[in-house]
Amino acid sequence: MQQGIRIMKITSAVYVKGITGSDPILHDGKFHVVFMGRSNVGKSTLINSLTRMPSLSRTSSTPGKTMHMDFFFINKQFYFLDFPGYGYARRTPMEREKLAKMILWYLRYSEVKKRVVILIIDTKVGVTAFDVDILRTLREEKIEHIIVANKIDNVPQNMKEKQLAMIRAAYGDSPVLTYSSKTHIGRKELLEKISAYTNSVLPS
Ligand code: GTP
Ligand code: MG
């Protein structure tokens, strides 16, 4: 860890609401930390790991659990947004299109100014076409982002470096962190990165 950077402590996390499009909450001026990624990559579990609240956001071994853009108010200062996953093959084409449109609308047209996107990749699966689309949009819209190679506990030791090298190659100059919600590996580093954005450096 870098000297002098203090990691925020999450002291409160409260579910506020789930939205599917335009809503006043988008424009209340609070910072958004947005968790995005393919269905089942572990977005909701990661939020629960960061907040140390295992039941905060609903998780499931069946993909497609999160259906709205769910807002959680953190430390009474900023939001964590848990997004529905994209690319879940067993949704109907109409459902998939609706979700993809919602995500793109949020990134391109919602006019939210203060935000960082945490783009989550399953380390074992690697980068998919959907991830590449999202990354392109993030770059086009000049949206700050951090890549998380998740479920690192699930990758055999002899595959780890190869998978991470592939992910790093796909993301070029974007920072890539490793994470596991099972072991909480990477928790400190991710909180440190998020703290740098939210400026909510609280006593630890
Ligand atoms: P959707 O809401 O459907 O898009 O899924 P999600 O990305 O929110 O995934 P969720 O958090 O519901 O987790 C999906 C599955 O992955 C669950 O069975 C979790 O227990 C499992 N999981 C999540 N994080 C990890 C991890 O770090 N390691 C391992 N081994 N499993 C994990
Ligand atoms: Mg979810």
Image (cartoon, grey):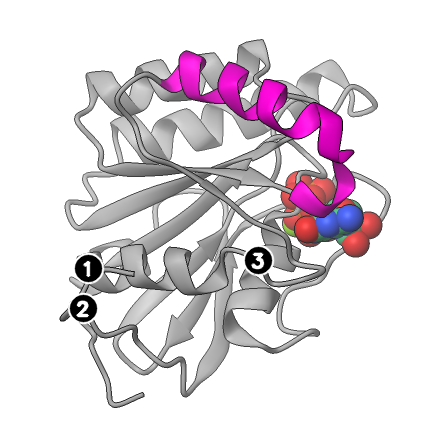
Q: Of helix, strand and loop, which one carries label 3?
A: loop
Give whichever of 67, 41 is nearer the camera: 41
CA gap, disc 2 and disc 1: 8 Å
Q: Main secondary structure of the magenta part?
A: helix
Circle 2: residue type: Ile
Q: Which mark is residue 185?
A: 3
Magenta residues (range):
151-171
Residue 59 in the figure: left or right of residue 73: right
Residue 190 image offset from top left, x and y in percent: 40, 56
Magenta residue check for 50: no
Q: Of helix, strand and loop, which one carries label 1?
A: helix
Give whichever of 200, 82 is nearer the camera: 200
Q: Are marks 2 and 1 in contact (CB under 8 Å)?
A: yes
Ligand 1 closer than 8 Å to label 3 CB: no
According to the image, label 1 marks what residue? 196
Is tag 2's residue or tag 1's residue first in the polypeptide sequence?
A: 2
In this view, 61 is above or below 41: below
Question: How many residues crowd mark 3 within 10 Å: few (<14), some (14–19), many (20+)?
Answer: some
Task: Give the residue drawn at x 78%, y 20%.
Answer: 92
Question: How many residues crowd mark 2 within 10 Å: few (<14), some (14–19), many (20+)?
Answer: few
According to the image, label 2 marks what residue? 5
Task: Give the residue drawn at x 31%, y 31%.
Answer: 107
